[in-house]
Image (spheres, grey):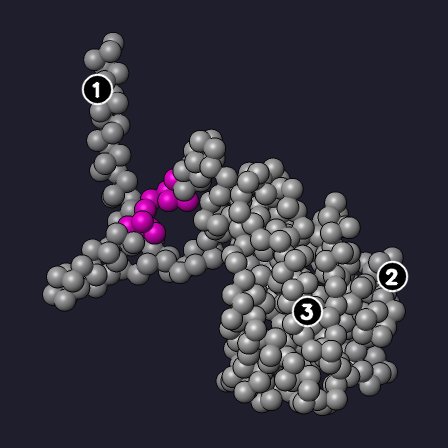
Amino acid sequence: MKNIQKKISAGLFLASLVLLPFFTIVSKKESFSQLENRSLQKTPELSADSWFDGDFMDEFDAFVSDHFAGRVKWIETKVHAELLTGKKEINGIYVSDGRLIEHTPDPDYSAVEKSVNAINTLASETDTPVYVMLVPTSAGIYTDSIPKNAPQNDQHEIISDIYGRFDSSVSTIDVYDILNASKEDYIYYRTDHHWTSLGAYYAYSTAIQKLGFSSVPYSRYDIEHASSEFLGTYYSKTLYNKIQPDIIDIYTSKEGSSVLSCTVSNAIEEKSYDSIYFREFLDVKDKYSLYLGINQPCIKIRTNLQSDKKILIFKDSYANSFVPFLTQHYNEITVLDMRYINDFRDYADPDEYTHVLFLYNSTTFSSDDNIKKIAY
């Protein structure tokens, strides 16, 4: 019986050596992994140069690794095995009970100083009031979910330090306190680096008062659970499948939508839509792009409000789920993403707006090398 078992084990092992490479070779090769949100290694091209300098073998190893049959299941199994050994961090993400949390990098104070100086310069050159709102990520709020003794930055302290660097002509908006006080609510996604619409609403209710308006009460919104199957960027980095998928919500004023048009512009073309929600993204992994679509240089929203209030927003993707709440207050909202812009004046003149707002999560602002371009 033992001999039979040994023969069966040996046969299965040999079969795996043959079948796995076979299925790897014949399986369909994708160019992009939706689950991991990244491009996969293309089939390497063999040449004399690539062979002798080692590039071919490096690319071939990456190709096999990216297209190995059953690859996702193998990775999931590996992650679970590592966690069982006591490991708490996978690809820069802490795995805690019910939540994935990023190990945030140290601030790049050289980039911070350039961004602060650029914003101070803009504020000195326009009569339009300039505001800055830095938002903590989930790692800055759910510090008790981070493994004990794990290295992590104090985002509250970092935000306070950055705010202290601005001139008096720049107004800062503190949303840390309201978010920290609401941490028991569903204000951040469990599997993604963004805040939820509820988190954005809490921040809006504080920020809009600083901007001179009264916030729309929570009870005045209808809330649609547009998807309950969102697996975000933290999931893509870990492929850890024991965290409950997230819920994507759409908040709609009970008085009806005020949006007339949403115009998306880049260097090549301009397209207009009748909604700020792009529901086609609910059918793919990148469900957060429901809000304003994929990142673009410029998005201009016009509403039917009988108002002359206009706001210019410089932002990262945290603004995407925040902007819908502003449609109840402004006749025009222009959203600029400096990652895709060299000269923002090609799209907007700050002097033509009622308010200018810089809205970034604190981790992005602490490393972004594009904000400085506004001073060029």
Marking on residue 53? none
Regarding residue 198, the answer to whether it shows in the image is no
State left or right for residue 43 relative to residue 251: left
* Range of residues picked out in magenta: 64-74
Regarding residue 85, the answer to whether it shows in the image is yes
Q: Which residue is mark 2?
A: 217
Q: Amino acid at mark 1?
A: Lys
The question of residue 359 being in magenta is answered with no
Which residue shows up at 60% across the image and 80% down it? 118
Q: Residues within 10 Å of mark 1 (few under 14, many from 20)?
A: few
Secondary element type, mark 3: loop
**Disc 3 versus disc 1: distance between alpha carbons?**
72 Å
Q: Residues within 10 Å of mark 2 (few under 14, many from 20)?
A: few
- Residue 311 is situated, as x and y percent measured from the top left of the image, at 74, 80
Q: Earlier in the sequence, mark 3 or mark 1?
A: 1
Marking on residue 164? 3
Tell me the mark number nearer the camera, choosing from 3 and 1: 3
Q: Amino acid at mark 3?
A: Gly
258 and 36: which is toward the camera: 36
- Residue 10 is situated, as x and y percent measured from the top left of the image, at 22, 24
In the image, is residue 140 above or below residue 308?
above
Which residue shows up at 37% across the image and 44% down it? 71
Marking on residue 7? 1
